[in-house]
Image: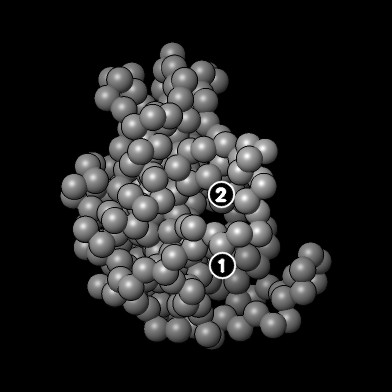
Amino acid sequence: MRPNGEDMSDNNVATIGEEYKYGFVDAIKPVFKSERGLSKRVVEAISYHKSEPQWMLDFRLRSLEVFNSKPTPTWGGNLSGLNLDEIYFYSKPTEQRDARTWEEVPEEIRNTYERLGIPEAERKVLAGVGAQYDSEMVYHRVKDELERQGVIFVSIEDGLKHHQDLFREHLGTIIPPEDNKFAALNSAVWSGGSFVYIPKGAKVDLPLQAYFRSSGPSLLWTKGRRFTTSKAAPHLATPPTPSTPA
């Protein structure tokens, strides 16, 4: 599926090899960008800019210790050329997070999503949209009728802020930091993603979709998390999206 919600039909497949029209680069300066490399100071900066509770910072720092203690995996792709000292692990594009209307999103960032067709797709085919720019979610909205059913679809940071007990109970229970070196890395420096709660009896017929956009070709490591919990197998329509479980 394309960013604007269009299916990859035979006609669309025929355009493969042409210039990718969504591959443009944005010239947006972040309000904060961490120093290069992975360190305790970088992890603490991420937690500070998100105003996280102490237990979340402790979770991140424990995960960093696990990451440093584990060897680089030898299965899968060749990671010998990966140099984490050259990577930025956090870039904050704006002080505005989790806007409820596109008008609240900074104009330069909003224009990017307009070019990608995200607001149009939201109006036509989606029950809710989350939009992440670099390391932060800048927009989240779910249809009013789903809110009335008790469906929650917000940034993972807002999920942590407003549903802390539920968040803490389930964080890291599917893939714990100890699972492997890069699970630990994600647990230490995660930023952005969606928090989804579907109560018993709720019916979600249209997809909930989250989008990620990077400001340019810089060495930026951004990996959010998706936190999804539901009651009694509700009716939920959602497209498969690559993500990291809670």
Residue 184, above or below 99:
below
Residue 232, above or below 211:
above
Give the side of residue 76 with respect to residue 47, left or right.
right
Question: Where residue 136 sits: x, y (%)?
Answer: 35, 59
Q: Nearer the viewer, residue 187 or 108?
A: 108
Quadrant of the drawing holding the N terminus: top right
Corner quadrant of residue 143: top left
Give, as a three-letter code, the residue at label 1.
Leu
Q: Nearer the viewer, residue 117 or 238?
A: 117
The crowd level at tag 1 (other Cα within 10 Å; few <14, some 14-19, many 20+) is many
The residue positioned 44% from the left and 49% from the top of the image is 211
Q: Earlier in the sequence, mark 1 or mark 2?
A: 1
Is residue 240 visible from the viewing direction of this image?
A: no
Q: Which element is circle 1 on?
A: helix
Give the side of residue 211 with respect to residue 96, left or right.
right
Give, as a three-letter code, the residue at label 2.
Ser
The residue positioned 39% from the left and 83% from the top of the image is 35
Q: Which element is circle 2 on?
A: loop
Q: Which mark is residue 243?
A: 2
The residue positioned 54% from the left and 59% from the top of the image is 20
The crowd level at tag 2 (other Cα within 10 Å; few <14, some 14-19, many 20+) is few
Is residue 120 visible from the viewing direction of this image?
A: yes
Give the side of residue 184 with respect to residue 44, left or right.
right
Determine the CA span between mark 1 and mark 2: 15 Å
Residue 89, above or below 204:
below
Q: Nearer the viewer, mark 1 or mark 2?
A: 2
Residue carrying label 1: 185
The residue positioned 33% from the left and 73% from the top of the image is 27
Which residue in the rendered view is the most extreme toward the left? 104
Which residue in the rendered view is the most extreme toward the right? 75
Question: Where residue 76 sits: x, y (%)?
Answer: 79, 65
